Amino acid sequence: MILDQLVNATKKRITRQQQQVPLATLQAQVAQLPARTNFAFETQLLKPGLAVIGELKKASPSKGLIANDFPYQQIACDYEQAGVAAISVLTEPDYFQGNDQFLPQVGQTVKLPLLRKDFTVAPYMIYQARLLGASAILLIVAILTDEQLRDYLALAEQLGLSALVEAHDAKEIKQALTAGARIIGVNNRNLKDFSVNLQNSIQLRQQVPADVLFVAESGIRTAADIAQLKTAGVDAVLIGETLMRATNKAAKLQELGV
Ligand SMILES: O=P(O)(O)OC[C@@H](O)[C@@H](O)c1c[nH]c2ccccc12
């Protein structure tokens, strides 16, 4: 199963990194940073209207290479000018051709809050996210225990990071809510078999109370998709491939009607 492979690869990578730079070093570095309390990612999604999170993703396990040419700083600028609320940056190297350094480099280029899109499996990665300049991290319910989910949410909060908690079904939404998630993303792509169904986020919308932000993720391609998601009352959409493949990001967003 792909999700297991992603988790295993990430655990290996982080173990290796932790041997080179121990957790205590990252903690000391974070302690030197000014406290951050504005939770910019969440603030952006709270604004009225449908918020768009544009994703920087060169490749993916389901689609292979998406962008041969990947001028990520330029794309980030284009996203910002096109009016997205935040940018999701894939940092996972083995399957998504991401890189941790995309975060600080994109952070230098745009003012928008950045989501570190990776498979968070250790507190180490949350300290990394803060040091790399992210405003938010991704926590995937399916790969964490309830205890980890709660602890990682608390750590993120303590470091001034928002957390997008990703669920795929009603049970996982309940786990996310119980853990105290304030932003829940419902993935339309099943990370176990890659199948995509836009109805997943639409059908699950009502499982999330109005005071928790709801993000519809994956497989969003057309104005009709956006119209349905708006009717369902989602707060935000996370769009990767459709925007990555569009030469003119602003025109694509206009076409989608967001
Ligand atoms: O490219 P798409 O179909 O628009 O999907 C974007 C985003 O939802 C997807 O990249 C994603 C959703 N959850 C993830 C978890 C890890 C990596 C990637 C993802």
Image: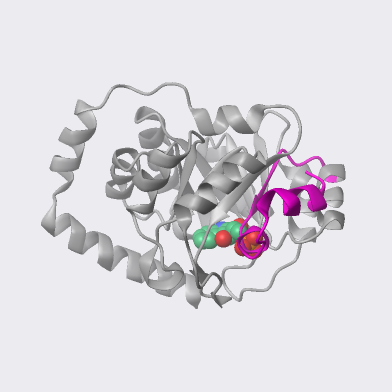
Q: Position of residue 106 (x, y in %)?
A: 42, 46
Q: Magenta residues, as a range? A: 232-258
Q: Residue at x 82, y 46 (%)?
A: 257
Query: Would you say 149 lies left or right of 205 here?
Result: left
* Ligand 1 quadrant assignment: bottom right
Q: Quadrant of residue 242?
A: bottom right
Q: Does the magenta stretch include residue 245?
A: yes
Nearer-the-camera pick, 214 or 85: 85
The answer to whether one can see residue 57 in this image is yes
x, y percentage for residue 185?
Answer: 62, 48
Quarter of the view holding residue 118: bottom left
Q: For the point 42% across and 21% down, which residue is it?
A: 37
Q: In this view, does 36 lie to the left or right of 253?
A: left
- Residue 61 spot, x, y in % from top left: 51, 75
Q: In which quarter of the image is the C terminus?
A: top right
Percent coordinates x, y for residue 225 in the rendering: 82, 56
Residue located 25% across and 27% down the image: 33
- Looking at the image, residue 87 lies above or below residue 63: above
